[in-house]
């Protein structure tokens, strides 16, 4: 059943009017008509099942039932801090990480990241990544939207990790085996992990993270691409502690 994201649904007498991009998607892309069933969700855990009641020139009116709770989120809250990747690689990562149930994604600039963006480009990129997360949630049936933090620098990103989190940084040159760290940290319900850019993290950056309580870990002998490493670790965490399997 088609799903549509309305962050603050205003419902009067069981009728919800949808405007803007979602209305255009209903009418012009999916070509839905009066009587067709849809689901509306607010991205914060509430959903509404309804039917298209009528179409107007710039909007679609949905007759909805009582709200119901979205499927439960993963019991482990995972934050992925990802050094900004080039072009479509970052788009792909946001899409797949959202499908895998990541709670929050923090794009950041490191010393080996792609060139820095000016303020307007940062805002434009952030809005694009948010749209990708919304579309991924709609597609996979998730009732929550992964939070996409604004782009920040490396030190600021480190400061966003809570003390209650298991803090990991992927580092191919040294560190503990991932299996050992996870085996010793089963009581943790929050995980914050860092993945660097295509060129890897610098020694100085790893040392700075260690000073903030991060544990360097490696996942094996093969060198993975940045986007592969992020999704691989996210999948492992959801299998071990979350809702996969």
Image (cartoon, rainbow, N blue to C red):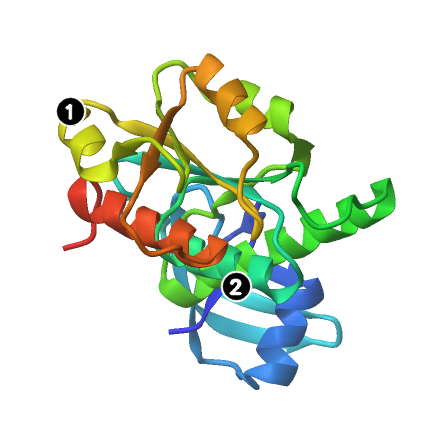
Q: Are marks 1 and 2 in contact (CB under 8 Å)?
A: no
Give me the residue at 53% from left, 29% from top.
203
Give me the residue at 68% from left, 56% from top.
128
| Residue 238 x, y percent position in the rendering | 25, 46
Classify mark 1: residues with Cα within 10 Å, few (<14), some (14-19) or many (20+): few
Mark nearer the N terminus (1 vs 2): 2
Classify mark 2: residues with Cα within 10 Å, few (<14), some (14-19) or many (20+): some
| Residue 116 x, y percent position in the rendering | 78, 44
Give me the residue at 71% from left, 64% from top.
20
Is residue 56 shown to the viewer in this render? Answer: yes
Quadrant where the C terminus lies? bottom left
Depicted 135 relative to depicted 103: above or below? below
| Residue 1 x, y percent position in the rendering | 37, 74
Q: What element carries label 1?
A: loop
Q: How far apart are marks 1 and 2 (CA)?
A: 32 Å
Left or right of residue 207: residue 223: left
Quarter-wise, where is residue 189 in the image?
Answer: top left
Q: Name the residue under label 1.
A: 184
Left or right of residue 228: residue 4: right
Q: Nearer the viewer, residue 76 or 71?
A: 76
Depicted 185 relative to depicted 78: above or below? above
Q: Nearer the viewer, residue 159 or 59?
A: 159
Give me the residue at 39% from left, 55% from top.
223
Comparing marks 1 and 2, which lies closer to the viewer? 1
Total residue callouts: 2
Which label sits on residue 92? 2
Is residue 70 shown to the viewer in this render? Answer: no
Quarter-wise, where is residue 113 in the image?
Answer: top right
Left or right of residue 54: residue 177: left
Q: What element carries label 2?
A: helix
Left or right of residue 29: residue 136: left
| Residue 200 x, y percent position in the rendering | 53, 44
């Amino acid at each position: 059943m088609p799903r549509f994201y309305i962050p603050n649904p205003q419902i009067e007498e069981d009728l919800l009017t949808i405007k803007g991009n979602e209305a255009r998607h209903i009418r012009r892309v999916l070509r839905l008509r009066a009587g067709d069933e849809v689901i509306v969700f607010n991205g914060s855990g509430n959903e509404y099942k309804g039917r298209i009641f009528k179409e107007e020139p710039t909007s679609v009116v949905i007759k909805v039932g009582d709200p119901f709770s979205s499927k439960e989120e993963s019991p482990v809250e995972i934050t992925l801090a990802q050094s900004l990747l080039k072009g479509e690689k970052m788009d792909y990562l946001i899409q797949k990480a959202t499908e895998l149930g990541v709670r929050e994604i923090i794009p950041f600039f490191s010393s080996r990241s792609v060139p820095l963006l000016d303020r307007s480009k940062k805002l434009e990129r952030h809005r694009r990544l948010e749209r990708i997360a919304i579309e991924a949630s709609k597609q996979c049936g998730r009732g929550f939207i992964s939070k996409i933090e604004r782009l920040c620098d490396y030190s600021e990103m480190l400061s966003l990790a809570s003390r209650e989190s298991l803090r990991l940084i992927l580092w191919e040159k040294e560190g503990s085996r991932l299996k050992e760290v996870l085996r010793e940290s089963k009581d943790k319900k929050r995980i914050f992990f860092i993945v660097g850019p295509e060129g890897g993290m610098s020694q100085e950056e790893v040392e700075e993270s260690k000073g903030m309580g991060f544990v360097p870990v490696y996942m094996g002998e093969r060198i993975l691409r940045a986007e592969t490493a992020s999704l691989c670790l996210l999948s492992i965490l959801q299998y071990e502690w979350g809702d996969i399997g």
